[in-house]
């Protein structure tokens, strides 16, 4: 049984006081969705503040990106060690905004994934196709390429602590959500790849999140798909009510 992971990617939003207020409200209300695992990924500069605001609540903390380098002359970067030092356990890697706005390649994502694992962080490795790739019938090929490239050299044992996220680029921040069938098709294919490349145990244990315009009104259907094990939420994660409503939908699926 895979515990649903409901993750908020706050992206480059909030300021110090709204980040603390959002984290505090989520922490206070985390009991509404105890059968789901909750995670917030604020901007890195607020990780420590958010960690304090979360206190002892059952809400995890993650970063949105990190360097593949452990330390040194890399102006503006943060290392895996810095992320763990601030109490984060997760890091989102290869988000489509990193890939498409900042030019991150599968090779970059792979180096970061290996560095995160070596530092004891759980990477949330994102994959997803562009609209033109979907329209050209290339979705499976693109996702397979990203899967292979981003996870090169990750052992079966390490893979058990990786989370995957399928985020179709055309559904991110657009209000155009993938249909539950479209999501399930890609998630099932990802699980098949896990079984082929590793083994059945790995395939059964890895959580595959869906991301792209997840909202309270579409969460139950998406999270109800066999191979959808949680959500990576952008816009709706900035409102505690919406984030928690999605978490409640995840918890309900876990109970069913
Ligand atoms: P939206 O939920 O705003 O579409 O963003 C999804 C996303 O990119 C989460 O990482």
Image (spheres, rainbow, N blue to C red):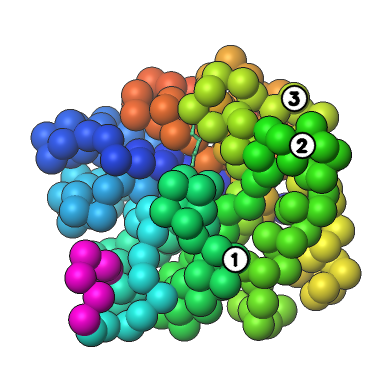
Residue for point 11% across, 35% down: 17
Image position, residue 176 (x, y; %): 62, 21
Mark on residue 243?
A: none
Residue 61 location, quadrant = bottom left
Q: Which residue is mark 2?
A: 134
Label 3: which secondary element: loop
Q: Determine whether label 1 and label 2 are within 8 Å by CB.
A: no
Nearer the N terminus, badge 1 or badge 3?
A: 1
Q: Which residue is mark 1?
A: 106
Q: Identify the residue at image location x=19%, y=53%.
A: 45
| Residue on which the image places disc 3 | 179
From this viewpoint, is residue 146 visible?
A: yes
Examine the structure image and report whether residue 252 is included in the region drawn in magenta: no
Find the distance from the CA under tag 3 to the CA under tag 2. Answer: 13 Å
Please provide the residue range marked out in magenta. 73-78
* Contact (Cβ within 8 Å) of mark 1 with mark 3: no
- Crowding around mark 3 (Cα neighbors within 10 Å: few <14, some 14 to 19, many 20+) is few
Q: Please, is residue 130 above or below residue 170 in the view? A: below
């Amino acid at each position: 049984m895979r515990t649903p992971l409901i993750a908020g990617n706050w992206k480059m939003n909030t300021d110090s006081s709204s980040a603390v207020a959002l984290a505090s409200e989520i922490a206070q209300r985390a009991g509404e969705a105890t059968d789901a695992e909750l995670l917030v990924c604020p901007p890195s500069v607020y990780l420590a503040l958010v960690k304090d605001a979360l206190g002892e609540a059952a809400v995890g903390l993650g970063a949105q990106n990190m360097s593949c380098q452990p330390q040194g002359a890399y102006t503006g970067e943060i290392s895996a060690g810095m992320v763990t030092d601030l109490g984060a356990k997760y890091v989102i890697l290869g988000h489509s905004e990193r890939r498409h706005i900042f030019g991150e390649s599968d090779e970059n994502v792979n180096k970061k994934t290996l560095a995160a694992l070596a530092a004891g962080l759980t990477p949330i490795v994102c994959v997803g196709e562009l609209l033109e790739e979907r329209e050209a019938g290339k979705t499976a090929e693109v996702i397979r390429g990203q899967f292979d490239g981003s996870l090169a050299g990750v052992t079966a044992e390490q893979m058990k602590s990786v989370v995957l996220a399928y985020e179709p680029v055309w559904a991110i921040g657009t209000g155009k959500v993938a249909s539950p069938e479209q999501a399930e098709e890609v998630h099932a294919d990802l699980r098949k790849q896990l079984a082929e490349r590793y083994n059945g145990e790995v395939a059964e244990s890895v959580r595959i999140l869906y991301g792209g315009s997840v909202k309270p009104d579409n969460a139950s259907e998406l999270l109800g798909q066999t191979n959808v094990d949680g959500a990576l939420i952008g816009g709706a994660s900035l409102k505690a009510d919406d984030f928690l409503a999605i978490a409640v939908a995840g918890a309900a699926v876990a109970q069913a």
